[in-house]
């Protein structure tokens, strides 16, 4: 092999290596851009979660809305007094819960769900009773 052929082969390999480096650099640039977009999306999700957690924080809601066993406590009152009807405010007094309007409205909503599920009935407007 003479020097001219050697120089042509070296030039060809150098051209291939340059093309490969350029290709890899484009891939790195594309991945860096995708990573930046993913990090931005993650930050937005974290911000949204923080906002929702702040809104849903128990201190921000009436006391009755934050307790996980609220439905069970309500049903216990009905189970302990079969056949008896209650108003939402009466249930709050029995359970020693706050009787402010917001808290009682949360309980009214829960009682409405229990009616729709078939666990309770409403013999009259505002009265709730265990289904027999």
Image (spheres, rainbow, N blue to C red):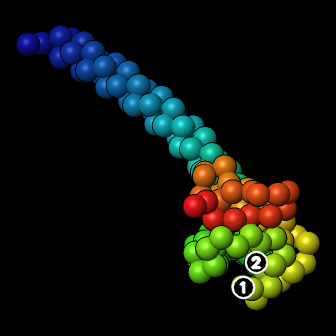
Residue found at the very far right of the displayed protein: 101
Residues at marks 1 and 2, CA–CA distance in whole angstroms: 6 Å
Which picture quadrant has residue 24?
top left
Where is residue 31 shown, x and y percent of the image? 48, 37
Q: Could you classify mark 2 by the number of other residues whose Cα lies within 10 Å: few (under 14), some (14-19), or many (20 or more)?
A: many
- The residue under the point 66% across, 49% down is 116
- The residue under the point 80% across, 85% down is 93
Q: Looking at the image, can residue 61 be seen? A: no
Which dot marks residue 91? 2
- The residue under the point 48% across, 28% down is 26
**In this view, 35 is above or below 119:** above
SS class, disc 1: loop
Where is residue 92 shown, x and y percent of the image? 78, 80
- 42, 72: nearer the viewer: 72
- 89, 121: nearer the viewer: 121
Count the marks: 2
Where is residue 90 shown, x and y percent of the image? 81, 78
Which picture quadrant has residue 77?
bottom right
Where is residue 16 shown, x and y percent of the image? 31, 19
- 104, 3: nearer the viewer: 104
Residue found at the very far bottom of the displayed protein: 96
SS class, disc 2: helix
Side (left or right) of 75 relative to 89: left
Q: Could you classify mark 1 by the number of other residues whose Cα lies within 10 Å: few (under 14), some (14-19), or many (20 or more)?
A: few
| Residues tagged 1 and 2 counted as in contact (Cβ below 8 A) | yes
Q: Looking at the image, can residue 16 be seen? A: yes
Which dot marks residue 17? none
**In this view, 85 is above or below 3:** below
Query: What residue does disc 1 label?
Result: 95
- The residue under the point 74% across, 70% down is 85
Which picture quadrant has residue 59?
bottom right
**In this view, 59 is above or below 36:** below
């Amino acid at each position: 092999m003479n020097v001219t052929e050697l120089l042509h082969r070296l030039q060809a390999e150098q051209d291939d290596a340059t093309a490969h480096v350029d290709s890899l650099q484009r891939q790195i640039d594309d991945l860096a851009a995708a990573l930046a977009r993913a990090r931005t999306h993650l930050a937005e999700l974290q911000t949204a979660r923080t906002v929702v957690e702040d809104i849903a924080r128990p201190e921000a809601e009436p006391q009755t809305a934050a307790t996980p066993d609220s439905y069970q406590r309500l049903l216990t009152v009905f189970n302990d007094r079969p056949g008896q009807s209650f108003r939402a405010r009466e249930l709050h007094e029995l359970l020693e819960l706050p009787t402010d309007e917001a808290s009682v409205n949360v309980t009214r909503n829960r009682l409405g769900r229990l009616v729709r599920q078939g666990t309770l009935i409403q013999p009259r407007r505002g009265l709730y009773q265990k289904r027999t």
